[in-house]
Amino acid sequence: MSHPRLQRHLIVPVFLLAVAALSAVVWRYGYLQALGQLSRRGDSDLALASDRLSAQLQVYRELAVLMADHPALSGLRITGELAGERDKARAVLLEVADKTGALDIFFADGAGRVVVSSTGNSNGLAGDDPAVRRAMQGALGSDHRFRAGDNRRIYTHAAPVFAETGKVRGALAVVSDVEQIETDWRGDRPAVFFTDDTGEVFLTNRSELLFWTRRGDGVGLAPRDGPAPSFAAGQTGPHEIWRLDWGPYVPRRALHLARDLPVIGLRGEALVDTAPARRLAGLQAAAVAAICLAFGALLFLAMERRRALAEANSELERRVARRTSALSAANTALRREVAEREEAEAALKRAQDDLVQAGKLSALGQMSAGISHELNQPLMAIRSFAENGALYLERGRGDKAADNLSRISDMVRRMGRIIRNLRAFSRQESEPAGRVDVVAVVDSAIELAGARLRRDGIELRFERPSAPIWVRGGEVRLGQVFVNLIANAADAMTGARVRRLDISITPAPGPAVRFRDSGPGLDAPDKVFEPFYSTKEVGASEGMGLGLSISYGIIQSFGGDIRGGNAPGGGAEFTVRLEPWVEEVAA
């Protein structure tokens, strides 16, 4: 048993070493490929920067060639010309310098003396300028240097000025300010600098490298004054890599590229940041390592799982019997719990229905005295009219007896209507919501609660619409809500000086029934629909605070809404909004 376990312990480190070696190879290959791409792009950027510099300097070269044949210079042969001729020539040179941005334009005679200059510096010597000496030999000359005095970097282009005999009689030189050219592309990427034949940085887009010179070993740069910063050069494949610390805007690890520019006498060099190449190579190596590790982990897990499955197979078979019996017991318990839950749901549904019915019976109980009075009056009247009718028949006065019988019939119809409303109100409705005339339901609720309102001296004002308003609901349950709201309003106005109940129905934009009383209003409008919330005293016989909660549930079941609040002029106002009835059209 120890031998296989030892093999398993050796597999993991060996596999990790193999993945590390493969990742290193992939990193190396990816790094070289990325450096190749950076090198090609860096060469393009360096060529573009070199061409742009050459093109900008070429402008001043062409300017020197064109100005050499200018008529304003044809009369300037010797230094002793009239001052007027020199002033005219100087004005021309100054105008050209202003328009082209040249630092200076001057004409020197054959002896190298400056005859006229755009800056007014005449009678000076320019013979020591290599560009002027070259022009005196009949060829185009160019030179770059640091001008004495202000240490300004200048680039001079000189063109020969020929006499009518064909001999060189002087030279026209155009001096350009290198810093003005450099400003246009300072800060561009990559870091580019141009060195002269002495190895000094003459032009660059990184100002911190300006005036640095080539190190003694011929590689790298160092400041003219001060300690040399850290620098190291190495070779990665065919690419030269510099490791340096030359400032925040110069990459710390850079690909060094160079190209000679014999036309302008400079050498262009670029430092391309290798961080993208290292990052790309790292991502490639990480991806390969992740894939290998994932594959190895899956393979290892598969092997371990296979071994674990083999070991657990026997244990699993032993547990199957125990688990089967346990599952059977759990299944039986689950079925019993499902049955109990179904019974609980049925009991809850019955309790809800009983609660709604109890609410209706409670309302009937509160209205019993008024309803008894409403039935007792017609009964007493029927008895009186029946006795009078019998007397009229004995006396032979049939017309009077018929009149009494007609009144008895009216009384019976009135009692039948009251009893019919009571039976409809008290029965337990189980039909789904359907088409109901809300105006008729309000009429029925008013008739049921009318005795209570008259007994308490409450003035009822009902703005009854002339046409039916059809809504979606149940007639009995909707009537229970309206009776409950009227009874609550009557309870709230007990003891009030003014007792008035206003009922109104608005058909649009959605059918709404409003009940507004003249009572003291609601202390907490947000809580009136909560179960067991009541403003009545504890232990009072009027109810337990379930009426509005039941009403809220009934209206919600119809897809409507009920809201309570305080009216602007005082008192409470309840609004019942219902869904309008829409006939279903068969497709």
Image (cartoon, rainbow, N blue to C red):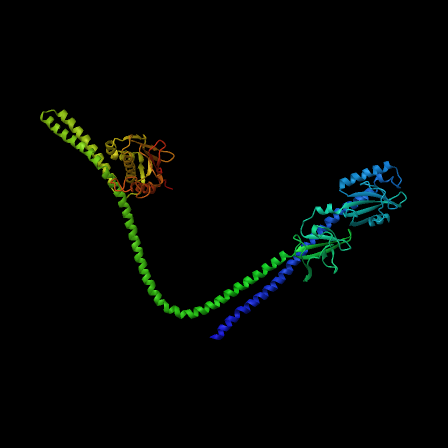
- Is the residue 283 above or below the residue 88 in the image? below
Q: Is residue 428 visible?
A: no
Image position, residue 257 (x, y; %): 70, 56
Exactly how many numbered labels are in the figure?
Answer: 0
User: Seen from this angle, which residue lies furthest left?
Assistant: 394
Asked if 563 appears above or below 327 in the picture, the reply is above
Which quadrant would the C terminus be assigned to in this image? Answer: top left
Q: Nearer the viewer, residue 18 or 128?
A: 128
241 vs 450, left or right, is: right
Q: Residue 552: where, in percent of width, then height?
A: 33, 41
Image quarter of residue 469: top left
Q: Nearer the viewer, residue 120 or 556?
A: 120
Q: Is residue 313 left or right of residue 252?
A: left
On the question of residue 477 being in view, the answer is yes
Residue 15: percent from left, percent from top? 54, 68
Return the x and y of residue 159 as percentages of the image width and height.
83, 46
- Would you say 584 lies left or right of 448 here? right
Residue 167 as seen in the image, left or right of residue 470: right
Identify the residue at image location x=90%, y=44%: 165
Query: Picture quarter containing residue 88?
Result: top right
Q: Residue furthest right?
A: 165
Q: Height in image: 444 above or below 151?
A: above
